[in-house]
Image (cartoon, rainbow, N blue to C red):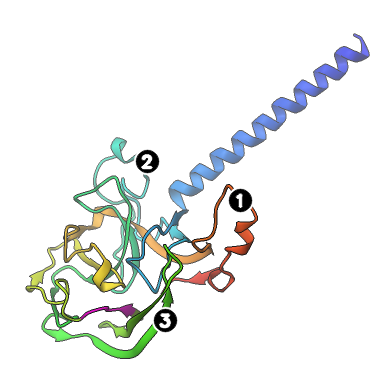
Amino acid sequence: MSMSSTSQGSAMSAFWENVRVILYALALAMVLRFTIAQPFRIPSGSMQPTLEVGDYIVVTKWSYGYSRYSLAPLEGLLPSGRLFGSSPERGDVVVFRPPHEPHKDYIKRVIGMPGDRIQMIDGVVHINGEAVGMESLGVQEFANGHSGFVERIPAYRETLPGGTSHVIFDRSPRGELDNTREVTVPEGHYFMMGDDRDQSDDSRRSVGFVPADNLVGPATFVVVSFDHTTNLFMPWTLFTGFRAERFLKAVE
């Protein structure tokens, strides 16, 4: 065999070895995505100020067990129900598939647990007839994630039964979503709300009650975040638009 043939054979062996390594890596990445954790990008401001447009979050798949929606895009091949299922806690920030749009991911906060009576009165959540804790934080300046314009928005610290505390925006206590009739959360379902209360399509609107089977998992932390100036076609903006203060920030 000539030296040329030997060199060509070695090159082909190296090529197929690289292909094998890449395929193994892709397979491992897919297994991790389906069973351990999955990244999501925040496209809207319904969870401001907790989550901002341009945040990339990590959602853990095992936290509530596995359902057909937590194993998307294989949901059409799997039965309903949860494997190793467990319940979310009140106040968790959760990715889920809403019943009216089962092929679309939403992210909201768990406000109502199964059996709870939920009502909004003048912008304050009432659970089983009791108002949750609301502390005014005054008007805060907040950079709009879509435009970059700075808004001045009334902010409050909301404390749910059990002690979970977080900051919400309530732009007007007299909006259509700030006064609702009392509803009872059915067994096996949850009542979800966005933290930007007047700009969220949640259980007060078309989302309705969310079945436990539709939960994907809780958001645990922001892995990276980019502002509105970032453009993949201008790679340098990945540095200029990087929001360092949100890097590896826990979701609370």
- In the displayed structure, does residue 41 sit left or right of residue 18? left
Query: In terms of image quadrants, where is residue 44?
Result: bottom left
Q: Which class describes the residues within 10 Å of circle 1: few (<14), some (14-19), or many (20+)?
A: few
Name the chief secondary structure element in magenta: loop
Instruction: Kindly identify which numbered label has been placed on residue 73.
Output: 2
- Residue 163 visible from this viewpoint: no
Q: CA distance from mark 2 to mark 1?
A: 31 Å
Which stretch appears magenta? 168-172
Q: CA distance from mark 3 to mark 1?
A: 29 Å
Percent coordinates x, y for residue 66 in the rendering: 35, 51
Which residue type carries mark 2?
Pro
Percent coordinates x, y for residue 163 in the rendering: 32, 85
Q: Are the residues flagged by discs 3 and 2 in contact, CB closer than 8 Å?
A: no
- Tell me the residue that label 1 is attached to: 234
Q: Earlier in the sequence, mark 3 or mark 2?
A: 2
Element on which disc 1 rests? loop
Q: Residue at x 14, y 73 (%)?
A: 116
- In the displayed structure, does residue 13 sit left or right of residue 250? right
Q: Nearer the viewer, residue 60 or 123?
A: 123
Q: CA distance from mark 3 to mark 2?
A: 39 Å
Where 200 sits versus 30, above or below? below
Q: Nearer the viewer, mark 2 or mark 1?
A: 1
Instruction: Please identify the residue farthest to the top as the structure is shown.
Output: 1
Q: Is residue 55 magenta?
A: no
Q: Are the residues flagged by discs 2 and 1 in contact, CB closer than 8 Å?
A: no
Q: Residue at x 50, y 42 (%)?
A: 30
Element on which disc 3 rests? strand
| Image quarter of the C terminus | bottom left
Instruction: Kindly identify which numbered label has been placed on residue 141.
Output: 3
Where 29 sits versus 63, above or below? above
